Image: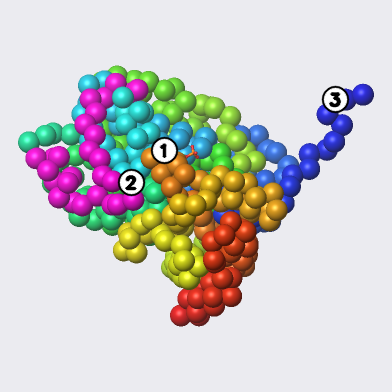
């Protein structure tokens, strides 16, 4: 008798946390298609289509644009490990948990790291970067576009200009922004970026799209030492996914099927419509939360559309509320990370999860749970405010 008698049975969930987001049934169906070999002409052609679709969503002509096998952190490691050699100087901008992770990875690459910090919940002013660049030569400057830990959107245009005027390369984390708001790699002159499949692109976790500019590729080609990671060495991955088709590792074939279908869904919707949908649902959620008497953590001008940080009222334990939300309503939202633990709750409206039904459901459930805790939160008022925002 097997100690594991039951076939896998997964509870139904509404995914409104910081990722993964909900996955369209077409993506799940694609993932269950029969396997082919990873060097099969069919699969190689599929990877070419994925690369084309990635260039489309990143808004770039970069030849070196790939789906790295691994989650967002693998993409992060591949950008840092390929651009940095021992002793290279990097400026890391930290205004949340993922900026901190960038520092950790840069140190592991043997780089000389200079870190500048901004309050968790605020974007960097270009003047802060200009100050750090004054009298300092950095090979790379890295920054997070959409800080999932705080809900802040980092404007890039002015910073990109400063970084390139100083002769440095710009490395940007677009894990949470890609597919939910404009990323515009070429327009923003971003040299290296990585993202994730499980946020606004709404595929299961496991693929990290990366893209490198010509300047970044040139820097990789001119390295004096081999990239310290065999698995994430872009020149080797280029031979595998590029024209050479030389075996490097066995691509996660089913994940690439699903990712392809998720990208196709995004393409069918169109970037502009997709961005407008994320913005509209975000506005409706915020209108509803504020009508309930809750406060947002980030100023309106710097808020992400796909990740909303709402302050936890002093009288309540947010971990307990989130557990009840999950067990009684099947709704997942996230807690605060690092400095914001216990202070904010993180509500994701990413990709397929960003829809009117989910906003309405969450506002209704939250109002019940807040009222149970003695906080007056009127569902009708919240839903009316959200409804008005949906229609505007
Ligand atoms: C901004 C940001 N960067 C990097 C990561 C790491 O991605 P993963 O957890 O897929 O490895 C995340 C994950 O939430 C993220 O939100």
Q: Sequence-wise, which precedes: disc 3 or disc 1?
A: 3
What residue would you read off at disc 3? 3
Q: Is residue 256 above or below residue 225?
A: below
Q: Sequence-wise, which precedes: disc 2 or disc 1?
A: 2
Q: Residues within 10 Å of mark 1 (few under 14, many from 20)?
A: few
Residue 91, can we see it?
yes
Which secondary structure, mark 1?
helix
Residue 122 picture location, percent across and down: 30, 52
Q: Sequence-wise, which precedes: disc 2 or disc 3?
A: 3
Q: Residue furthest left?
A: 135
Per the rendered image, the range of residues in magenta is 108-134
Judge: label 3 CB < 8 Å from ligand 1. Answer: no
How far, Cα to Cα, is label 2 from label 1?
10 Å
* Residue 230 magenta: no
What residue would you read off at disc 1? 338
Q: Nearer the viewer, residue 313 or 363?
A: 313
Q: Nearer the viewer, mark 2 or mark 3?
A: 2
Judge: label 2 CB < 8 Å from ligand 1. Answer: no
Residue 61, can we see it?
no
Image point (13%, 40%), residue name = 133
What residue would you read off at disc 2? 120
């Amino acid at each position: 008798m097997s100690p594991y008698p039951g076939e896998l049975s997964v509870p139904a969930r509404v995914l409104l946390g910081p990722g993964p987001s909900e996955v369209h049934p077409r993506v799940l169906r694609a993932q269950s298609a029969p396997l082919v070999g990873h060097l099969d002409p069919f699969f190689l052609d599929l990877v070419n289509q994925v690369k084309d679709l990635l260039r489309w969503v990143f808004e770039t002509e970069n030849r070196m644009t790939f789906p790295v096998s691994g989650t967002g952190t693998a993409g992060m490691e591949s950008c840092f490990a390929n651009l940095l050699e021992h002793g290279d100087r990097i400026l890391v901008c930290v205004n949340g948990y993922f900026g901190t992770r960038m520092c950790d990875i840069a140190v592991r690459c043997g780089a000389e790291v200079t870190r500048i910090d901004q309050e968790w919940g605020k974007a960097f002013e270009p003047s802060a970067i200009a100050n750090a660049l004054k009298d300092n030569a950095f090979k790379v400057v890295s920054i997070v576009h959409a800080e999932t830990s705080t809900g802040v959107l980092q404007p890039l245009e002015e910073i990109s200009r400063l970084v390139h005027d100083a002769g440095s390369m710009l490395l940007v984390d677009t894990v949470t922004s890609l597919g939910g708001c404009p990323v515009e790699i070429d327009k923003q002159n971003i040299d290296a970026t990585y993202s994730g499949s499980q946020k606004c692109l709404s595929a299961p976790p496991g693929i990290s799209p990366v893209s490198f500019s010509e300047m970044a590729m040139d820097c990789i080609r001119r390295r004096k030492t081999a990239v310290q990671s065999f698995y994430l060495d872009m020149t080797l991955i280029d031979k595998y996914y590029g024209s050479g088709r030389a075996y490097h590792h066995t691509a996660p074939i089913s994940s690439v099927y699903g990712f392809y279908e998720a990208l196709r869904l995004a393409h069918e919707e169109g970037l502009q419509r997709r961005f407008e949908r994320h913005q509209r649902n975000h506005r409706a959620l915020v209108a509803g939360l504020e009508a309930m008497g809750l406060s947002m953590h980030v100023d309106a001008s710097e808020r992400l559309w796909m990740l909303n940080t709402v302050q936890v009222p002093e009288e309540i334990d947010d971990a307990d509320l989130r557990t009840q939300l999950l067990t009684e309503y099947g709704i997942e939202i996230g807690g605060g990370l690092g400095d914001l633990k216990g202070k904010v709750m993180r509500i994701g409206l990413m990709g397929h999860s960003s829809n009117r039904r989910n906003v309405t459901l969450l506002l209704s459930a939250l109002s019940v749970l807040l009222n149970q805790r003695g906080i007056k939160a009127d569902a009708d008022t919240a839903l009316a405010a959200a409804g008005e925002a949906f229609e505007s």
